[in-house]
Image: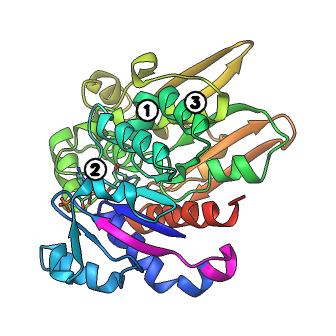
Amino acid sequence: MNISLIGIGNVGKRVLEIIRDAQSGLRERSGESIKVISASDSRHTVYSENGMDVSRVLEAKSRGDIRKSGYRELVFDEIFSLKTEAIVDVASATPDGIAGRDLYLKAFGAGKDIVTANKSPLALHWEQIMDECKQAGRRIRFESTVAGGVPLFNLRDFSIIPSEVLQFRGVVSSSVNIILNDIINGRSFESSVEYAIKQGIAETNYHDDTLGLDAARKTVILANALFGTNLTLNDIQYEGVEGNMDKVSSLKGKGGLYRVVSSIRKEGSRTSVFSGIEEIGEKDPLRALGNESLGYTMRTDMNGEVLVVGLEDTPLETASGVVNDIALLAKTRA
Ligand SMILES: NC(=O)c1ccc[n+]([C@@H]2O[C@H](COP(=O)([O-])OP(=O)(O)OC[C@H]3O[C@@H](n4cnc5c(N)ncnc54)[C@H](OP(=O)(O)O)[C@@H]3O)[C@@H](O)[C@H]2O)c1
């Protein structure tokens, strides 16, 4: 499987490391090797027709310029004419998702599949991306857009095929929950954000997390992928911590367990969708989650209620989900 990788940040670096370090297991379990033909960051694209030694790219990136790998530089748009089967998007999210959307449409037009961890394009342009993917006869996999490396869409697509999903409830975004928990336990908003940034849990630009936007984007993708809706971020109700301090402060001292939960359920022909703060009661299956873990319960008609929890949420698990999607494309190629 030949790929172009876009983004060599926290997740992209780990994607390269997994491809380097787990190649024999990947080959054994997917039937194919994964070759990185090109890699791009925000400034440059490097390329080798026969696949790059990813250690050279990683080392050059650590020295501040991927061109120091010695591989030939390309103009970004040349990636569409390379001999690759898939483009892997682990680039930064943009608020409008347009750059990602345009990338995917161009890739489908050039006969390439997409693997992405980037939420914005799917949360804002789902219908157009999925329609054009289908029309072009291509495939898109997006496991790591929601809940890091916790198996979710692949579980739905490969393990519970006969079932309809009736209800989904999940904690799919860790930063906002860690900050929420800290504030309920007595820290101020400012100090809990500062702490989360120092720990590498929240980004310096933390507002997407604290406003609940990150969790809301994931909730839109969940509703569309699991319940067949065609929603965008503008169609759903959501809340976070920032701008919601009256509610958050009112939870202090109550002794309950609270999380920002993505809740989606079928109500007749309607699908109700909400991303916001809920109390996790004593008998709630989501009680099994630790403070920093992600997980969900999915109620189905044929498989009962399924509970899945991932105890760790770091870029490694996300990257592993991305590489799994690449391997799945290889394994399920017609
Ligand atoms: N971190 C996680 O655990 C996690 C979990 C789930 C999903 N995600 C998603 O995965 C993606 C990557 O996250 P990250 O944590 O790795 O971010 P990151 O560390 O900020 O890295 C982003 C990478 O994208 C590159 N980039 C930005 N704009 C680009 C462009 N126009 N063309 C090519 N490359 C571009 C950046 O280039 P430079 O190196 O030149 O700046 C950088 O290498 C994001 O969409 C994020 O939402 C991340």
- Location of the C terminus by quadrant is bottom right
Q: 185 left or right of 149?
A: left
> Neighbour class for label 3 at 10 Å: few (<14), some, many (≥20)?
some
- Amino acid under label 1? Ala
Say if the magenta span includes residue 30: yes
Relative to 280, residue 153 above or below: below
Give the residue displayed 47% in from the left and 55% down from the top.
148
Q: Is there a contact, CB below 8 Å, between mark 2 and mark 1?
A: no
Nearest the eye: 319 or 168? 319
Q: Secondary structure at mark 1?
A: helix
User: Does residue 254 appear in the picture of this structure?
Assistant: no
Residue 217 placed where, x, y %?
42, 34
- Amino acid under label 2? Ser
| Residue that badge 3 annotates | 224
Give the residue displayed 13% in from the left and 80% down from the top.
63
The colour scheme applied to this rendered structure is rainbow
Q: Secondary structure at mark 3?
A: helix
**Extreme-top residue of the structure:** 269
What span is colored magenta in the figure? 27-39
Numbered tag placed on residue 123 in the rendering: 1
Give the residue displayed 47% in from the left and 42% down from the top.
109
| Residue that badge 2 annotates | 92
Say if the magenta span includes residue 40: no
- Amino acid under label 3? Asn
Marks 3/2: CA–CA distance:
22 Å
Mark sitting earlier along the chain (3/2): 2
Marks 1/3: CA–CA distance:
9 Å
